[in-house]
Image (cartoon, rainbow, N blue to C red):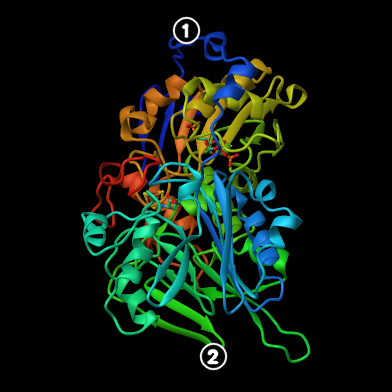
Amino acid sequence: MSDLLLQDELVTNELGVSASNAALQRNSGPSFDEDDDATPREADEHFDKLREECGVMAIYNHPDAARMTYWGLYSLQHRGQESAGIASADGQNVNDIKGMGLVSEIFTDEVLAKLPGHMAIGHTRYSTTGDSALLNAQPISVESIRGLIAIAHNGNLVNLGNSRERLERDGAVFQTTSDSEIIIQLIAHSKASTLVDCIADSLSQVDGAFSIVMMTRNRIFAARDPHGFRPLSMGRIPGVDGAPDTFVFASETCAFDLLHAKYERDVKPGELVMVSEDGVTSRYFDTKTRQASCIFEHVYFARPDSRIFGRWVQKSREEMGRQLARESHVDADLVVPVPDSGVTAALGYAAESGIPFNLGLIRNHYVGRTFIQPEQRVRDFGVRMKLNPVRSLLEGKRVILIDDSIIRGTTSRKIVRMVRAAGATEVHLRISCPPTISPCFYGVDTPSKKDLIAANQSVAEICQFIEADTLAYLSLVGLTHSCTKGEPLHGLEPGDFCTACYTGDYPTQWVDVDEILPATTSVG
Ligand SMILES: O=P(O)(O)OC[C@H]1O[C@H](OP(=O)(O)OP(=O)(O)O)[C@H](O)[C@@H]1O
Ligand SMILES: NC(=O)CC[C@H](N)C(=O)O
Ligand code: SF4
Ligand SMILES: [Mg+2]
């Protein structure tokens, strides 16, 4: 038994926070059976659509632009599963088709045939402002004196103030209750002389997180907010036999691989890129703001096969695991990841500690992400439906479980019990980020403070609640180090990340958007 195990109170060291649970009170809180009273049918009836983040995609100069966008969105499905849409243009007309549900459910061959043209933009949505309804599905198109313009947005605006009322007084007719439409209405009502100036003018008026792609009948635009909260990359498919190249923009570079597009660069914070028949041009609408890219993209959201903010997610996650092993070692027989997002960090932890790695929990691939399910009963059932222990691996073993984060504590509590019930003699939990103590206002729908377990309980109390023998989180220094280590050329410095959900120190002023745009399906 390690020293860590013998300690019963919160242990804070230079790098991390940890706690042990030698005096487990296994009878405190609801019992396993009480937690599990949702039947499959009840759970199914209450199962909300999975909610993560939005994905955006754009393509310029391809004969089958809508189909390419479809494939790109398919790779970005993990960023949003509530609704999806594609708008295409052929130089004259813009058409769009949107629907509720998954990309593959909405876009059949027949539907894609109704989206002609060599340009397209697309979106997979997970709502943060405005409810999850067809009218808020994206791309959103608005007619202006400069023609029709369509937008797809990942992020969340925070300074909406009275801009919606002001625009309505100027004659804007809003079609949606989402924040994204404000950007496009500001463009349509800008007094600047050219479309590019109108866009730059609009983008410099809004604050918060926006990685956007836009399309007119003959141009594509891509832009990122000055903090660079959300990712957005540009890729290129070389033209065959002297034909012009195809340009692609996507939230994550994993979308490029399927299209045989080569990653070229990130759209920079505060940059507006335009692609037209004259080629690619770029300008900055803000150069003074400090970068604050979302570190949670590296911890949880993005796929490990994506390069985010100039750095492979796989590299960051593996290093998080290694650093976690250095900060909070515990003697054990087996390192077991909590799939999916815990897998890469667990590989790093095992490599650094020399403790064998194995898949002691098997994931059902037909159940998605659970942490933002609306009802506790459903979340409880969702975890059990999704993850199942491998008794033959766990029996008689001292197990270290590795997960990327604890939000409400639902997953951890279930998994620790599950692994113990499968015969593990000790269960130690290691988390590859610091305690999540504050909600996000920048496009990730983490719950309010009252539901974030680490905002209300100490690490020792959480350890007791989840019934682990010990619990330790990665330190903030360890996390930023893991996302920057060995990246001298393209990556970010530790200070270039937003870490507000671990510190409560937000890079922008924020307003609760629900107060400004209440979730309602009625418009006008
Ligand atoms: O403390 P909780 O409220 O339970 O939330 C934390 C869990 O939620 C996430 O997993 P999720 O199932 O959403 O997705 P994943 O398959 O990508 O890990 C995260 O990876 C944790 O496992
Ligand atoms: N998660 C997101 O990026 C959401 C985009 C936008 N705020 C919406 O609610 O539609
Ligand atoms: S608050 Fe957290 S989740 Fe939100 S942008 Fe900042 S680091 Fe990312
Ligand atoms: Mg998980």
Q: Quadrant of the N terminus?
A: top right
Query: Is 233 above or below relative to 10?
Result: below
45 or 437, nearer to the observer: 45
Determine which quarter of the picture holds residue 41: top right
Q: How would you rate the neighbour count of disc 1 (Cα within 10 Å): few for under 14, some for 14-19, many for 20 or more?
A: few
Task: Using the numbered discs, state the Cα–Cα distance from disc 2 to disc 1 in whole angstroms.
Answer: 70 Å
Name the residue beneath numbered marker 1. 27
Residue 78 placement (x, y as % from top left):
59, 48
Name the residue beneath numbered marker 2. 278
* Total numbered circles: 2
Q: Secondary structure at mark 1?
A: loop
308 or 442, nearer to the observer: 442
**In the image, what residue occupies the spot 44% across and 75% down?**
147
Query: Is 318 above or below relative to 69?
Result: above
Q: With 202 as the anchor, is 140 left or right in this view?
A: right
Query: Is 343 above or below relative to 74?
Result: above
**In the image, what residue occupies the spot 67% across and 33% down?**
334
Residue 453 placement (x, y as % from top left):
38, 29
Q: Secondary structure at mark 2?
A: loop
Hey, what amino acid is under mark 2?
Answer: Asp
